[in-house]
Protein backbone atom coordinates (compact mmCIF):
# COMPACT_ATOMS: atom_id res chain seq x y z
CA UNK A 1 0.00 0.00 0.00
CA UNK A 2 1.43 3.41 -1.02
CA UNK A 3 1.47 6.48 1.20
CA UNK A 4 -0.55 9.40 -0.24
CA UNK A 5 1.62 12.32 -1.45
CA UNK A 6 1.46 15.46 0.71
CA UNK A 7 0.41 18.51 -1.37
CA UNK A 8 0.32 21.32 1.26
CA UNK A 9 2.74 23.15 3.56
CA UNK A 10 2.51 22.69 7.26
CA UNK A 11 2.03 25.82 9.30
CA UNK A 12 5.63 25.65 10.50
CA UNK A 13 6.96 25.40 6.94
CA UNK A 14 4.82 28.36 5.89
CA UNK A 15 6.12 30.48 8.74
CA UNK A 16 9.73 29.56 7.90
CA UNK A 17 9.17 30.47 4.24
CA UNK A 18 7.63 33.82 5.21
CA UNK A 19 10.56 34.54 7.54
CA UNK A 20 13.09 33.77 4.80
CA UNK A 21 11.24 35.97 2.33
CA UNK A 22 11.14 38.81 4.89
CA UNK A 23 14.89 38.55 5.48
CA UNK A 24 15.62 38.53 1.74
CA UNK A 25 13.30 41.51 1.17
CA UNK A 26 14.99 43.40 4.01
CA UNK A 27 18.42 42.78 2.49
CA UNK A 28 17.20 43.81 -0.96
CA UNK A 29 15.56 46.96 0.40
CA UNK A 30 18.73 47.98 2.22
CA UNK A 31 20.76 47.39 -0.94
CA UNK A 32 18.30 49.40 -3.04
CA UNK A 33 18.40 52.26 -0.54
CA UNK A 34 22.21 52.28 -0.63
CA UNK A 35 22.19 52.35 -4.42
CA UNK A 36 19.68 55.20 -4.44
CA UNK A 37 21.70 57.16 -1.88
CA UNK A 38 24.89 56.67 -3.89
CA UNK A 39 23.12 57.76 -7.08
CA UNK A 40 21.70 60.87 -5.39
CA UNK A 41 25.13 61.77 -4.02
CA UNK A 42 26.72 61.36 -7.44
CA UNK A 43 23.96 63.42 -9.10
CA UNK A 44 24.42 66.10 -6.45
CA UNK A 45 28.17 66.13 -7.09
CA UNK A 46 27.59 66.59 -10.82
CA UNK A 47 25.13 69.42 -10.20
CA UNK A 48 27.46 71.20 -7.79
CA UNK A 49 30.27 71.02 -10.31
CA UNK A 50 28.29 73.12 -12.78
CA UNK A 51 28.08 76.33 -10.66
CA UNK A 52 31.70 75.78 -9.58
CA UNK A 53 32.81 75.77 -13.20
CA UNK A 54 30.46 78.68 -13.90
CA UNK A 55 32.32 80.77 -11.33
CA UNK A 56 35.55 79.89 -13.11
CA UNK A 57 34.04 81.07 -16.39
CA UNK A 58 32.95 84.27 -14.67
CA UNK A 59 36.54 84.75 -13.54
CA UNK A 60 37.82 84.11 -17.07
CA UNK A 61 35.41 86.73 -18.43
CA UNK A 62 35.86 89.40 -15.75
CA UNK A 63 39.14 88.45 -14.06
CA UNK A 64 37.48 88.23 -10.67
CA UNK A 65 35.06 85.94 -8.85
CA UNK A 66 31.61 87.46 -8.27
CA UNK A 67 30.60 88.83 -4.88
CA UNK A 68 29.37 86.13 -2.57
CA UNK A 69 26.58 88.53 -1.57
CA UNK A 70 25.84 92.16 -2.39
CA UNK A 71 25.12 94.72 0.29
CA UNK A 72 22.88 97.75 -0.10
CA UNK A 73 26.01 99.80 -0.81
CA UNK A 74 27.39 97.58 -3.55
CA UNK A 75 28.17 99.51 -6.73
CA UNK A 76 26.39 96.95 -8.92
CA UNK A 77 22.95 98.12 -7.66
CA UNK A 78 21.76 94.53 -7.28
CA UNK A 79 21.13 94.47 -3.52
CA UNK A 80 20.88 91.10 -1.78
CA UNK A 81 21.84 89.17 -4.91
CA UNK A 82 25.01 87.12 -4.94
CA UNK A 83 27.12 84.53 -6.70
CA UNK A 84 24.03 82.50 -7.64
CA UNK A 85 22.81 85.32 -9.90
CA UNK A 86 26.21 85.81 -11.54
CA UNK A 87 26.52 82.10 -12.29
CA UNK A 88 23.32 82.02 -14.37
CA UNK A 89 24.77 82.99 -17.79
CA UNK A 90 27.28 80.14 -17.48
CA UNK A 91 24.77 77.40 -16.54
CA UNK A 92 22.46 78.00 -19.52
CA UNK A 93 20.19 80.37 -17.60
CA UNK A 94 20.89 83.52 -19.59
CA UNK A 95 17.21 84.42 -19.98
CA UNK A 96 16.64 84.24 -16.22
CA UNK A 97 19.73 86.39 -15.67
CA UNK A 98 18.47 89.01 -18.13
CA UNK A 99 15.05 89.01 -16.47
CA UNK A 100 16.62 89.51 -13.05
CA UNK A 101 18.73 92.43 -14.26
CA UNK A 102 15.64 94.01 -15.83
CA UNK A 103 13.68 93.47 -12.60
CA UNK A 104 16.37 95.27 -10.59
CA UNK A 105 16.21 98.20 -12.99
CA UNK A 106 12.48 98.37 -12.33
CA UNK A 107 12.80 97.97 -8.55
CA UNK A 108 15.81 97.71 -6.25
CA UNK A 109 13.54 96.03 -3.70
CA UNK A 110 13.83 92.36 -4.77
CA UNK A 111 11.02 90.87 -2.68
CA UNK A 112 8.02 91.54 -4.91
CA UNK A 113 6.96 89.48 -7.91
CA UNK A 114 6.49 91.00 -10.39
CA UNK A 115 8.88 92.44 -11.36
CA UNK A 116 11.14 89.98 -9.51
CA UNK A 117 9.66 86.77 -10.88
CA UNK A 118 13.01 85.08 -10.34
CA UNK A 119 12.16 84.95 -6.65
CA UNK A 120 10.01 81.87 -7.26
CA UNK A 121 11.93 80.42 -10.22
CA UNK A 122 13.59 77.11 -9.42
CA UNK A 123 17.07 76.63 -10.92
CA UNK A 124 17.53 72.83 -11.01
CA UNK A 125 21.32 73.11 -11.12
CA UNK A 126 21.27 74.73 -7.68
CA UNK A 127 19.15 71.98 -6.08
CA UNK A 128 20.47 68.74 -4.59
CA UNK A 129 18.29 65.85 -5.85
CA UNK A 130 18.13 64.47 -2.30
CA UNK A 131 16.56 67.70 -1.02
CA UNK A 132 13.08 66.86 -2.25
CA UNK A 133 11.35 69.68 -0.36
CA UNK A 134 12.70 72.35 -2.69
CA UNK A 135 12.27 70.97 -6.18
CA UNK A 136 9.29 73.35 -6.30
CA UNK A 137 8.89 76.85 -4.77
CA UNK A 138 7.89 76.96 -1.13
CA UNK A 139 6.19 79.59 1.00
CA UNK A 140 8.31 81.11 3.76
CA UNK A 141 6.48 80.81 7.09
CA UNK A 142 7.71 84.21 8.21
CA UNK A 143 7.23 86.34 5.09
CA UNK A 144 4.49 84.29 3.37
CA UNK A 145 6.48 84.73 0.17
CA UNK A 146 6.76 82.05 -2.52
CA UNK A 147 10.47 81.51 -3.08
CA UNK A 148 12.91 79.13 -4.74
CA UNK A 149 16.08 77.91 -3.05
CA UNK A 150 19.67 76.82 -3.38
CA UNK A 151 21.14 73.70 -1.79
CA UNK A 152 24.65 75.13 -2.30
CA UNK A 153 26.15 78.09 -0.44
CA UNK A 154 29.34 80.02 -1.01
CA UNK A 155 32.06 79.43 1.58
CA UNK A 156 32.75 82.82 3.17
CA UNK A 157 35.60 81.56 5.37
CA UNK A 158 35.62 80.69 9.02
CA UNK A 159 32.64 82.99 9.47
CA UNK A 160 30.85 85.39 7.17
CA UNK A 161 32.07 88.36 9.17
CA UNK A 162 35.68 87.19 9.04
CA UNK A 163 35.85 87.34 5.20
CA UNK A 164 38.72 84.85 5.06
CA UNK A 165 37.19 82.75 2.26
CA UNK A 166 36.49 83.47 -1.39
CA UNK A 167 32.76 84.34 -1.40
CA UNK A 168 31.67 86.86 1.21
CA UNK A 169 29.72 90.11 1.21
CA UNK A 170 30.93 92.45 -1.56
CA UNK A 171 33.94 90.20 -2.17
CA UNK A 172 36.13 90.65 -5.24
CA UNK A 173 38.54 87.76 -4.95
CA UNK A 174 40.82 86.71 -7.80
CA UNK A 175 42.12 83.19 -8.19
CA UNK A 176 45.61 84.62 -7.74
CA UNK A 177 44.58 85.78 -4.25
CA UNK A 178 44.10 82.15 -3.20
CA UNK A 179 47.65 81.55 -2.00
CA UNK A 180 46.68 78.40 -0.10
CA UNK A 181 46.11 76.79 -3.50
CA UNK A 182 42.87 76.40 -5.41
CA UNK A 183 42.85 72.63 -4.83
CA UNK A 184 43.06 73.21 -1.05
CA UNK A 185 40.43 75.94 -0.72
CA UNK A 186 36.66 75.54 -0.49
CA UNK A 187 34.37 77.53 -2.78
CA UNK A 188 30.85 76.04 -2.41
CA UNK A 189 29.27 73.56 -0.03
CA UNK A 190 26.00 71.81 0.69
CA UNK A 191 23.44 73.05 3.17
CA UNK A 192 19.70 72.51 2.70
CA UNK A 193 17.34 75.48 3.23
CA UNK A 194 16.22 76.23 6.77
CA UNK A 195 13.33 74.37 8.36
CA UNK A 196 11.02 77.38 8.04
CA UNK A 197 12.13 78.22 4.46
CA UNK A 198 13.36 81.63 5.60
CA UNK A 199 17.03 80.96 4.75
CA UNK A 200 18.53 79.47 1.64
CA UNK A 201 16.84 81.70 -0.95
CA UNK A 202 18.75 81.55 -4.20
CA UNK A 203 17.58 85.07 -5.02
CA UNK A 204 17.25 88.05 -2.70
CA UNK A 205 19.20 86.34 0.06
CA UNK A 206 19.25 88.89 2.87
CA UNK A 207 20.74 86.55 5.46
CA UNK A 208 21.60 87.24 9.06
CA UNK A 209 21.91 90.98 9.78
CA UNK A 210 21.76 91.75 6.03
CA UNK A 211 25.07 89.95 5.41
CA UNK A 212 23.83 87.09 3.26
CA UNK A 213 24.87 84.69 6.03
CA UNK A 214 22.91 81.42 5.87
CA UNK A 215 21.14 82.46 2.66
CA UNK A 216 23.71 82.32 -0.17
CA UNK A 217 26.98 82.27 1.83
CA UNK A 218 28.07 80.59 5.06
CA UNK A 219 31.14 80.23 7.22
CA UNK A 220 32.37 76.89 8.48
CA UNK A 221 32.13 78.20 12.06
CA UNK A 222 29.13 80.47 11.58
CA UNK A 223 27.54 82.03 14.67
CA UNK A 224 23.85 82.50 15.34
CA UNK A 225 23.63 86.29 15.11
CA UNK A 226 19.96 86.65 15.97
CA UNK A 227 16.90 84.64 17.03
CA UNK A 228 16.09 82.90 13.75
CA UNK A 229 13.14 80.73 14.71
CA UNK A 230 10.59 81.52 17.40
CA UNK A 231 11.28 79.26 20.34
CA UNK A 232 14.54 77.99 18.83
CA UNK A 233 16.99 76.37 21.21
CA UNK A 234 19.94 77.08 18.93
CA UNK A 235 22.93 78.41 20.80
CA UNK A 236 25.14 81.30 19.70
CA UNK A 237 27.62 78.97 17.90
CA UNK A 238 30.10 78.73 16.41
CA UNK A 239 28.66 75.83 14.42
CA UNK A 240 30.97 73.11 13.06
CA UNK A 241 30.60 70.86 10.03
CA UNK A 242 28.27 68.21 11.40
CA UNK A 243 25.06 66.36 10.54
CA UNK A 244 21.67 67.89 11.26
CA UNK A 245 18.83 65.88 12.75
CA UNK A 246 16.85 66.36 9.54
CA UNK A 247 15.25 68.98 7.32
CA UNK A 248 13.19 70.16 10.30
CA UNK A 249 16.26 70.85 12.48
CA UNK A 250 16.02 74.61 13.28
CA UNK A 251 19.76 74.80 13.98
CA UNK A 252 20.81 73.16 10.71
CA UNK A 253 20.85 76.49 8.91
CA UNK A 254 24.03 77.56 10.73
CA UNK A 255 26.35 74.87 9.39
CA UNK A 256 27.17 72.90 6.28
CA UNK A 257 25.49 69.48 6.10
CA UNK A 258 23.63 67.36 3.60
CA UNK A 259 20.94 64.68 3.36
CA UNK A 260 23.64 62.25 2.17
CA UNK A 261 24.83 59.77 4.81
CA UNK A 262 28.16 60.61 6.43
CA UNK A 263 29.04 64.01 5.01
CA UNK A 264 28.47 66.55 2.23
CA UNK A 265 29.74 67.54 -1.19
CA UNK A 266 32.03 70.56 -1.49
CA UNK A 267 33.35 72.34 -4.57
CA UNK A 268 36.96 73.51 -4.37
CA UNK A 269 38.39 76.56 -6.05
CA UNK A 270 40.04 74.45 -8.77
CA UNK A 271 36.56 73.36 -9.91
CA UNK A 272 36.76 69.86 -8.44
CA UNK A 273 34.00 68.46 -6.22
CA UNK A 274 34.77 66.14 -3.32
CA UNK A 275 32.65 64.44 -0.70
CA UNK A 276 33.92 65.34 2.77
CA UNK A 277 33.08 63.14 5.74
CA UNK A 278 32.02 64.85 8.95
CA UNK A 279 35.27 63.50 10.43
CA UNK A 280 37.02 66.20 8.37
CA UNK A 281 35.54 68.96 10.54
CA UNK A 282 38.86 69.63 12.28
CA UNK A 283 40.52 70.67 9.00
CA UNK A 284 37.53 72.39 7.39
CA UNK A 285 38.44 75.84 8.84
CA UNK A 286 41.84 75.59 7.16
CA UNK A 287 40.22 74.56 3.88
CA UNK A 288 37.83 77.52 4.12
CA UNK A 289 40.56 80.18 4.18
CA UNK A 290 42.12 81.44 0.96
CA UNK A 291 45.42 82.68 2.39
CA UNK A 292 45.89 81.18 5.85
CA UNK A 293 49.07 79.29 5.00
CA UNK A 294 47.79 76.09 6.63
CA UNK A 295 48.99 72.63 5.64
CA UNK A 296 45.95 70.38 5.36
CA UNK A 297 45.67 66.61 5.26
CA UNK A 298 42.18 65.19 4.96
CA UNK A 299 41.44 62.34 7.39
Image (cartoon, helix red, strand yellow):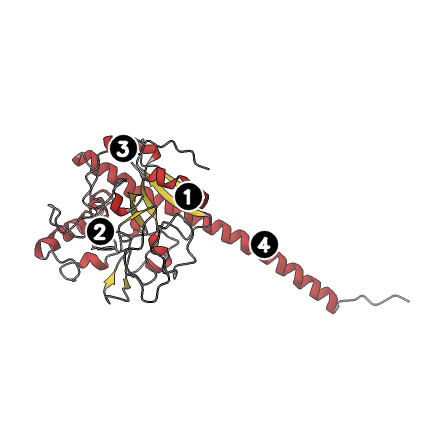
Q: Which mark is residue 27?
A: 4
From the viewer's perspective, is the residue at label 1 or at label 4 nearer? 1
The residues tagged by marks 2 and 1 sit, at their Cα atoms, a distance apart of 24 Å
Indicate which disc residue 211 carries. 2
- Label 2 with label 3: CB-CB less than 8 Å: no
- Tell me which residue sits at (35%, 41%) in the image: 285
Q: Is residue 8 visible?
A: no
Image position of 27 with respect to 278: above or below: below
Q: In front of the other: label 2 or label 3?
A: 2
**3 and 1 marks in contact (CB < 8 Å):** no
Q: CA distance from mark 2 to mark 3?
A: 22 Å
| Element carrying mark 2 | loop
Q: Quadrant of the N terminus?
A: bottom right
* Disc on res. 50: none
- Badge nearest the viewer, 4 or 3: 3
| Tags 4 and 2 touching, CB below 8 Å | no
Residue drawn at point x = 12 percent, y = 54 percent: 104
Cα–Cα gap, marks 3 and 1: 21 Å
Q: Residue at label 1? A: 281
Q: Is residue 82 left or right of residue 265?
A: left
Q: Alpha-carbon distance for marks 1 and 4?
A: 32 Å
Nearer the N terminus, badge 4 or badge 3? 4
Residue 181: where, in percent of width, then height?
A: 31, 31
Q: Relative to the observer, which residue lies in front, 51 or 12?
A: 51
- The first of marks 1 and 4 along the sequence is 4
Residue sticking out furthest to the left: 106
| Circle nearer the N terminus (2, 3) | 3
Badge 4: few (under 14), some or many (20 or more) residues near its Cα, within 10 Å? few
Amino acid sequence: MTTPRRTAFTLLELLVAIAIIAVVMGLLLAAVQKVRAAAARADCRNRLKQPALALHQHHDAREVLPPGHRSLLNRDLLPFSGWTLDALPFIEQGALYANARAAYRASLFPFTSPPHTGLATVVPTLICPAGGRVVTPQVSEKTKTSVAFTSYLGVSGTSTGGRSGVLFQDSRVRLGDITDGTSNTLMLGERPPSADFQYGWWYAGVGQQLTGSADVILGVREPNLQPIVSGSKCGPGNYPFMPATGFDDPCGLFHFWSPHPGGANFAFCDGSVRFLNYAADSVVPALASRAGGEVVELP
